[in-house]
Each structure stands twice: as C-alpha cells, then as structure tokens.
Amino acid sequence: MTGIFGKIFGGKKKGSDVTPYDVIEETLNGVLEAGNFELSFDLDEENGEYFVELYGDDEELLKSKEGQLLDAFQLFVKRVLQHQFPEDNIHVNLDSDGFREDANEALLDLADKLKGIALDKGKSVYFRALPPKDRKIVHQYLAEDGRVKSRSVGEGHFKKIKIYPIKGKGSQVEDQPNS
C-alpha cells in the first residue's frame, strides 16, 4: 500500500526512523490534498506534544458547526499516530485562528452563568450534552468553586452536566472570588 492509506493501515516498519512529526505532516498533507482543501498548516513540537495550526481560504469550514471538521481532523491524526506508534502516548492538538481557546472560553462563561443560577435558586441545573473533552474543561472549572459540584449524566459519548449547589453552601455564603 502506498500514499495516505498505506501510512494509516501499513503500520510502522521495523527499524524505521519515521517520527510522529513525519506521520502528522504526511497524514495532514494527504487529507488536505485528497479533500481539495485550500488549507496549509504549521507543525510545532514542544516537550513531546505536537501543535498544528491550520490556515487558509477554507479556514471557516474548520470552525463551522462548532468545529466538527477540526475535531474530525484531530481525531483522524490521533488514530493514525496510535496505529503507527501503538506503544507511545502521543498528544497532538489541531487549531485554527484561536478557535479552541475561544470555544473553551464560551464554555466557561456558560458554566459560570449556570453555576450562578444553581446557587441563586438552590437547585440543580443542567448543561447541554457535551463530548468528553468539553465536559472535562467544565468539570475542572466548577471544581475550583467549593459551593457547587458537577457530574456527567446520560449514556453514550455526549452527556449532560448536572451542576448542583452543595447543601449549606448556597448563595447565603459570601461570594468567593473566581480565580
């Protein structure tokens, strides 16, 4: 097998000096070419973690529909790396024009708003269904405030987040500053 599918399904050759950097670069070049995307990328490695910044005329496609195409590219690259380097735990992050940071900030803003509602009303509130990576961000943020707890509820990949006040620590306690 040759080309992109050979890289994906061919496996790492014994004694090969192919690096994760090479695999990421070749995989992304193949995907972008096969899909006729008007995109380029910069690839950096820092402390064993790989960062890819995608840019070009089709940038908006990556960010539309809550970044689903960007997520798909990232998942695809991760799977190729897992196949090529099954014994290694390689982290790769794809982004475009700060989309990930903006999306995370919006998640935290909504979590803060729902936390306030839960504390004011003394009742549980629910965050919309989210994928695991987004739930982790919300749970970590809410864990910083000792007045509320959160947990994932539901089945499958996408689950809702239940945010509820801890008994006796509602809004009657002085507001703690957010850090």
Image (cartoon, rainbow, N blue to C red):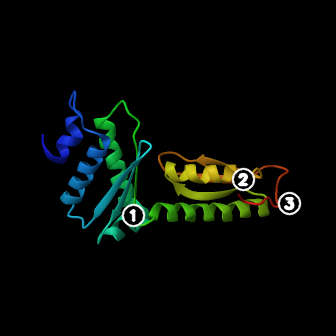
Residue at image location 23% in from the left, 55% down from the top: 29
Distance in Å between CA atoms under marks 2 and 3: 17 Å
Q: What secondary structure is found at the residue carrying circle 3?
A: loop
Q: CA distance from mark 1 to mark 3?
A: 40 Å
Query: Where is residue 87 drawn, in percent x and y?
Result: 36, 30
Residue nearest the observer in this picture, 139 or 54: 54
At x 21%, y 38%, the residue is 9
Residue beneath the point at 29% across and 48% down: 24
Looking at the picture, does residue 155 appear above or below residue 55? above
Labels 2 and 3 touching (C-beta < 8 A): no
Residue at image location 28% in from the left, 36% down from the top: 84
**Residue 11's spot in the image, x, y percent?**
23, 34
Instruction: Report the residue marked by disc 2.
Output: 164
**Screen quadrant of the C terminus:** bottom right
Q: Is residue 177 left or right of residue 41?
A: right
- Assess disc 1: are there few (<14), some (14-19) or many (≥20) residues with their C-alpha within 10 Å of its C-alpha: some
Closest to the observer: 124 or 86?
Answer: 86
Q: Amino acid at mark 1?
A: Ser
N-term mark: 2 or 3: 2
The residue wearing badge 1 is 96
Label 1 with label 3: CB-CB less than 8 Å? no
Q: Which mark is residue 174?
A: 3
- The mark tally for this picture is 3
Spot the residue most to the top. 14
Badge 1 or badge 3: first in the primary sequence: 1
Secondary structure beneath disc 2?
strand
Quadrant of image for the N terminus:
top left
Q: CA distance from mark 2 to mark 1?
A: 34 Å
Q: Disc 2 vs disc 1: which is toward the camera?
A: 1
Q: At label 3, which amino acid type do we have?
A: Glu
Q: Is residue 175 above or below residue 84?
A: below
Q: Are marks 2 and 1 in contact (CB under 8 Å)?
A: no
